[in-house]
């Protein structure tokens, strides 16, 4: 009987995240799923708008870009040629960037190589803000690659649109990081943009640093750490449950946390 119990325990430890999530409080698993769906819906809305805009871009680039700006949480819309130079930009105050070579930016590198829809890594844009590019390829009438049409999004704005309504329910809150450890979204706004693995704010919390490395390395999981209470300075123990959200191969880690 003892051998049977030990074997069962071993199997449980080796179970995938789907089973781990089921053993976590079911309400937390459900809340994380709801948050993941909310973020995915915003990303999908942007991607769908770009897919609809692509066939119209050649005939009316200015009108197409202005249409993209309507109702989407985006900072800049642009058309890029096959060499990676911007040929049209909206809003008007950013038109000074027409002619800029963005071919070394991650989303442009991927688009120019694959000729497929892309979402790039987070970077500092020429406009001066931290953003992420989401682009769709453009093709000529002869089906030749002609560049791309896309948007730059501030991650905190995109994520706030999805997650702000869910923050604080039943003591839970959400934060998001990319796999480099950059905080893309947090209930404590001053933390947005900080690097977990190098910023002095986090160095006194070895459990958080260790958990951050696990989150960066694994698409899904759960763990525990100590950090200051959301909106305060008192250090408290917290539990965390995380999953992955993203688009076209780009991946962000969505974390549900709560005080233990």
Image (cartoon, grey):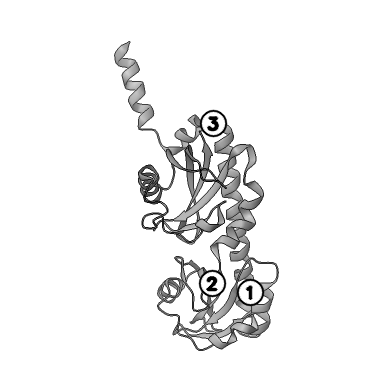
Q: Relative to 237, is 209 above or below?
A: below
Front-most of residues 245 and 255: 255
Res 114 → quadrant? bottom left
Which residue is the extreme one toward the left? Answer: 3
Mark 3 or mark 1: whose residue is earlier in sequence: 3
Mark 2 — residue? Answer: 136
* Sequence-earlier tag: 1 or 2: 1
User: Which percent across, then down, holds residue 208?
Assistant: 40, 45
Residue sitting nearer the eye, 78 or 207: 207
- Mark 3 = which residue? 25
Q: Position of residue 170 (x, y in %)?
A: 63, 37
Q: Contact, CB < 8 Å: mark 3 with mark 1?
A: no
Q: Which mark is residue 53?
A: 1
Q: Residues within 10 Å of mark 1 (few under 14, many from 20)?
A: many
Marks 1 & 2, CB-CB < 8 Å contact: yes
Task: Estimate the spatial distance between the alpha carbons at disc 1 and disc 2, rounded to whole Å.
Answer: 9 Å
Is residue 95 depicted above or below 133 in this figure?
below
- Find numbered disc 2 in the image and state the secondary structure of the residue it sits on: strand
Residue 43 seen from this side: no
Query: Quadrant of the image for the N terminus?
Result: top left
């Amino acid at each position: 009987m003892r051998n049977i119990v030990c074997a069962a325990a071993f199997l449980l430890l080796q179970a995938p995240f789907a089973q781990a999530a089921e053993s976590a409080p079911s309400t937390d698993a459900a809340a994380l799923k709801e948050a993941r769906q909310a973020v995915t819906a915003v990303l999908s809305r942007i991607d769908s708008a770009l897919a609809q805009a692509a066939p119209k871009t050649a005939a009316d680039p200015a009108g197409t870009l202005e249409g993209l700006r309507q109702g989407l949480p985006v900072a800049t819309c642009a058309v890029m040629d096959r060499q990676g130079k911007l040929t049209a930009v909206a809003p008007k105050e950013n038109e000074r960037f027409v002619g800029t070579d963005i071919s070394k930016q991650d989303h442009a590198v991927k688009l120019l190589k694959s000729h497929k829809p892309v979402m790039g890594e987070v970077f500092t844009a020429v406009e001066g803000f931290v953003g992420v590019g989401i682009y769709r390829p453009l093709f000529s009438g002869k089906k030749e690659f002609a560049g791309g049409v896309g948007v730059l999004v501030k991650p905190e704005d995109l994520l706030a649109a999805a997650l702000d309504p869910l923050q604080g329910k039943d003591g839970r809150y959400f934060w998001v990081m990319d796999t480099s450890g950059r905080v893309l979204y947090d209930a404590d706004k001053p933390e947005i943009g900080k690097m977990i693995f190098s910023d002095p704010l986090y160095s006194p919390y070895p459990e958080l640093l260790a958990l951050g490395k696990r989150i960066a390395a694994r698409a899904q999981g759960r763990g525990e750490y100590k950090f200051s209470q959301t909106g305060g300075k008192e250090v408290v123990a917290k539990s965390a449950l995380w999953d992955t959200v993203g688009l076209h191969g780009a991946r962000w880690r969505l974390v549900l946390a709560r005080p233990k």
